[in-house]
Image: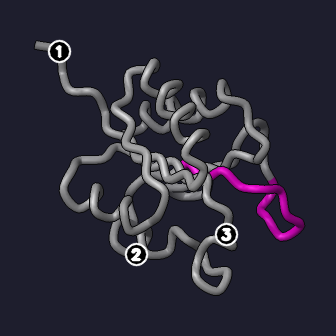
Amino acid sequence: MPPPKPVVVVLEDQPELGRVIREVLGSEGFDVRPVQDTTSALRILRVEKVEFLVSDLSSDVGAGGADPLEALASEFDALPVIVIRNARADDVPFFGRWHEDGSRLYLRRPFRLDDLVSAAREVHSKV
């Protein structure tokens, strides 16, 4: 029997883009769980062994402009996260296709799906 596929939570507030990301990462061997909010992501994280999370939420989705990943990071601080963000003047500089900062790997929006796949492979190789 083959080993189980690594579980990945995709936090995406646009259902169609979530479906596309699920298909692309699924074709790469990941078991993708798309969700549209952090509450749903927390439900999955608390009951399943999740390898990493992909977040394509804007920072303004959080309450009062807060980081929508704050609740996830406080409870699952070691969970690797691929964060897809808009370029902003106060961002840390990006190097190449992504920038790594602790357990977060940043991809700049707009992103190419093959860059997301490469980032997912990178995170998976380190777990």
Question: Which residue type carries mark 1?
Answer: Pro
Determine the secondary structure under disc 3: helix
Q: Are marks 1 and 2 in contact (CB under 8 Å)?
A: no
Q: Relative to residue 65, is residue 41 depicted above or below? A: above
Q: Is residue 31 left or right of residue 54?
A: left
At 67% from the left and 80% from the top, the residue drawn is 65
Q: Which mark is residue 2?
A: 1
Which residue lies under the disc numbered 3?
59
Question: Which residue type carries mark 3?
Answer: Ser
Which residue lies under the disc numbered 2?
74
Query: For the residues marked 3 and 1, what is the alpha-carbon distance in whole angstroms?
Result: 38 Å
Give percent across and percent down for residue 46: 23, 62
Q: Which mark is residue 86?
A: none
Please report whichever mark, 1 or 2, sits nearer to the chain's N-terminal start. Answer: 1
Is 91 magenta? The answer is yes
Instruction: Give the farthest residue toward the bottom.
Output: 64
Give percent across and percent down for residue 110: 79, 42
Q: Which residues are magenta?
A: 82-93
Q: Which quadrant: the N terminus?
A: top left
Please report whichever mark, 3 or 1, sits nearer to the chain's N-terminal start. Answer: 1
Nearer-the-camera pick, 48 or 35: 35
Determine the secondary structure under disc 2: helix
Image quadrant assignment for residue 61: bottom right
Is 47 magenta? The answer is no
Which is in the foreground here, disc 3 or disc 1? Answer: 3
Determine the secondary structure under disc 1: loop
Q: Which quadrant: the C terminus?
A: top left
**Crowd tier of the residue under label 1, counting other residues whose Cα lies within 10 Å: few below 14, some 14–19, many 20 or above:** few
Question: Which residue type carries mark 2?
Answer: Ser
Query: For the residues marked 3 and 2, what is the alpha-carbon distance in whole angstroms?
Result: 16 Å
Predominant SS along the magenta part: loop
